[in-house]
Amino acid sequence: MKTTEEITTAIKAIKPRGAWARARQTYALELLADVEGDFSHKKLLNGAPNWQAFSEGGCALIYDKDIAERVCCPSQLIIRRHGRLDPNPVENWIQCQTRCLKQAAALIARHA
């Protein structure tokens, strides 16, 4: 089992291509910054039962505009009016963030 420092170094070495990949990497690094010692999925969730509760509970970004700016490329950000419009027909911004957080946790697990 790798330490959080080793996982952080491995994730920082990734060269993300695209806004979503950069957002996933940023979320992963933020999650790891809050974990001390050895990595565990339970520590990443910070007491929340799942990623939806983590996101809705304010453990990550809380404003639609901030989430949109993190996960969208510039052209998509304009189309979505900087978070005033939902990201797609089936999700709101918190749900979109939840999906990205799940992928960030999977990225961490892959490098653990």
Image (cartoon, grey):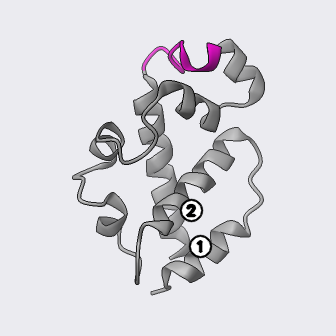
Could you tell whether 104 is left or right of 56 in the image? right
Give me the disc on residue 35. none
The amino acid type, in three-letter code, at marker 1 is Thr
Q: Which one is nearer the viewer's eye here, 85 or 16?
A: 85
Q: Quadrant of residue 19?
A: top right
Which residues are the magenta region?
81-90
Predominant SS along the magenta part: loop
Find numbered disc 2 in the image and state the secondary structure of the residue it sits on.
helix
Q: Which one is nearer the viewer's eye here, 1 or 63?
A: 63
The amino acid type, in three-letter code, at marker 2 is Leu
Could you tell whether 11 is left or right of 61 in the image? right
Q: Measuring 46% from the left and 40% from the top, which residue is drawn there? A: 61
Could you tell whether 78 is left or right of 29 in the image? right
Q: Measuring 56% from the left and 62% from the top, which residue is drawn there? A: 29
Residue denoted by label 1: 8
Q: Quadrant of residue 84?
A: top right
Residue 83: percent from the left, percent from the top?
56, 20
Residue 10: percent from the left, percent from the top?
65, 74
Give me the disc on residue 29. 2
Give the alpha-carbon distance from disc 2 to disc 1, as whole Å: 6 Å
Q: Measuring 62% from the left and 38% from the top, which residue is drawn there? A: 70
Find numbered disc 1 in the image and state the secondary structure of the residue it sits on.
helix
Residue 48 sits above or below residue 1 on the image: above
Q: Which one is nearer the viewer's eye here, 50 or 61?
A: 61
